[in-house]
Image (cartoon, rainbow, N blue to C red):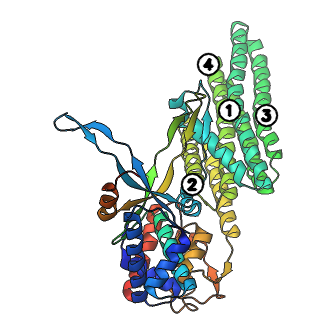
Amino acid sequence: MNQKITLPDVAEWVARRQGCSKREAELFLREMASLTAETLASGEALKIEGLGLFKPVWVEPRTTVNVQTGEPFLVPGHYKLVFTPEKRVRDAVNEPFSCFSAEVLSDDADFSALRVTESVQSDEDVEDLDDESGNDEAIVSFQTDEELPHPDAAADVPSDPVAVAEEPSEPAEAESGDLAASTVETELSQSDTVADVPSEPAAVAEQPSEPTKAEPVQEANDRLGAAVPSTTDEEASDVSSPENMNDLLRRERMRGFWIGAVVAATITAFVLFSVYIVVHRPFASVDEAKGVAAVQVTVPATTADTVAALPSESGDTTRLTDSVDNRVAVAAVQPASAGVVKDTLGRGEFLTTLSLKHYGHKAFWVYIYDANKNIISNPDNVEAGTVLTIPPREKYGIEAADSVSIRKALNIADSLKVKR
Amino acid sequence: MEYKDFVELLRQRTGKEKGETEAMIESFCRVVTERCAQMDSVTIQGLGTFEARKKMERISVNPATGQRMLIPPKIVVVFKPNTYIKNSLKGRAKQ
């Protein structure tokens, strides 16, 4: 990363590739450089296959101003050298950004808004669809579908309590005998609506095809069902004291609804998060890692909301255990998918090639070396056909998108070099 | 100069086989590409510097249609010739 490499270093690598001595490679490269320089200085174009085209281009004379004095002066026409890299070179260097493509902007598009979040989100979705196989695509589309009902559920629930909350105002004017009956009524209607709330996540739970995702939701629903009676019990005890009964009832009911809504939202968020983790676990590219980061940011926000909204509530503890359960489920899935990988070193391949192939960056070859120390005597020269164990990323904290992880690997490589 | 002539000249200078010369050039190109892909800069004494530069995303407008395009960010290889090549090219008259 941002290292300055000079001819002797290049000669060393070339020698390693060609199997000749370093001195020989250096002499050759010097000869090649001087021949190239002579050719270019003579004004000839030169094409080197595998690198690109060097071409002198005429720059027309132009006037410009002296920055210090402001005096205009003429820059005479001259030749300058233009280097056009070959497509292969261009693509190799642009690899980190290869996922992007030029996009047409519509005339009325507000660019400032485009840049912030919306475009990033939609871009990622599109890329996901492009990159993943059909099976994953279904899950991605399911994710986006999921997001719709979940704010809706939250929106629906507050509107219900308003309707219910208006009802008790009538009984308040009526006789106390009627009141008892009416509270029973409202209680019933409330428990109905509360029952409706979990039914929505239940419907959601049937949608995903994978059983692992459905289970936590089902479990959570059971817990929800358990939590609902407890709140109604509390209300029953409140009914016994006639003072401010309606206010208490209303507040209690509102709280019940909000709890239901927030629990539903949290569970949906957790399920989405766990699905995301399971599907996208190998964070192959920078963009995906970004996406995960975005999800991670949103999830804690919602959990913080629920905790803040529900202090001293008995349901609190069950919810926490819910979230813990979900995390445990996610953690259990992760190691299962990361099995032991083996790969055979082909001709002209290095540990770095394997590292690039499996981890997305060359620097992690040190970990492959570390895992195969008993087989490899010299990491610079591993025989073709050697079967190597590719350690799982988790073992060494390998993350191609993380510069800290890369630097760590580079440091290990340096220390290895020093040892030898 | 065509690549074939270049290889031939280089072969005469170094006294190597043609295939060997080509293989050497090939691995040189690969090393330069690999290093540039890692955002390193490769300086060849007597020739110049190959380095990777990041280009920001930009909006380009097609002057004919007025259509606006968002050009994504990219990393490109640039070659900076050394002063000898630059100056000798500068001194040349237009042909």
Which quadrant of the structure image shows residue A194?
top right
Query: Which mark is nearer the camera, 2 or 3?
Result: 2
Three-letter code for the amino acid on which mark 3 is drawn = Ala
Q: Residues at badges 2 and 3 in contact (C-beta under 8 Å)?
A: no
Q: Residues within 10 Å of mark 3 (few under 14, many from 20)?
A: some
Three-letter code for the amino acid on which mark 2 is drawn = Ala
Q: Secondary structure at mark 4?
A: helix
Three-letter code for the amino acid on which mark 1 is drawn = Pro
The residue singled out by tag 1 in the image is A151
Residue under the image location 73 percent in, 47 percent down: A140
The residue singled out by tag 3 in the image is A195
Which badge, 4 or 1, is on the more N-terminal residue? 1
Query: Which mark is nearer the camera, 4 or 3?
Result: 3
Query: Which mark is nearer the camera, 4 or 1?
Result: 1
Which quadrant of the structure image shows residue B72?
top right
The residue singled out by tag 4 in the image is A247
For residue B35, say whether it is visible. Answer: yes
Task: Tell which of B35 and A316 is nearer to you.
Answer: B35
Instruction: For mark 3, name the chain.
Output: A
Which badge, 4 or 3, is on the more N-terminal residue? 3
Which badge, 2 or 3, is on the more N-terminal residue? 3
For residue A242, say whether it is visible. Answer: no
Query: Which mark is nearer the camera, 3 or 1?
Result: 1
Instruction: For mark 1, name the chain.
Output: A
Q: Residues within 10 Å of mark 1 (few under 14, many from 20)?
A: few
List x then y, in percent, for residue B87.
30, 59
In the rendered structure, find residue A289 and report the number of the disc placed on it: 2
Instruction: Tell me: residue A31, above or below residue A328.
Output: below
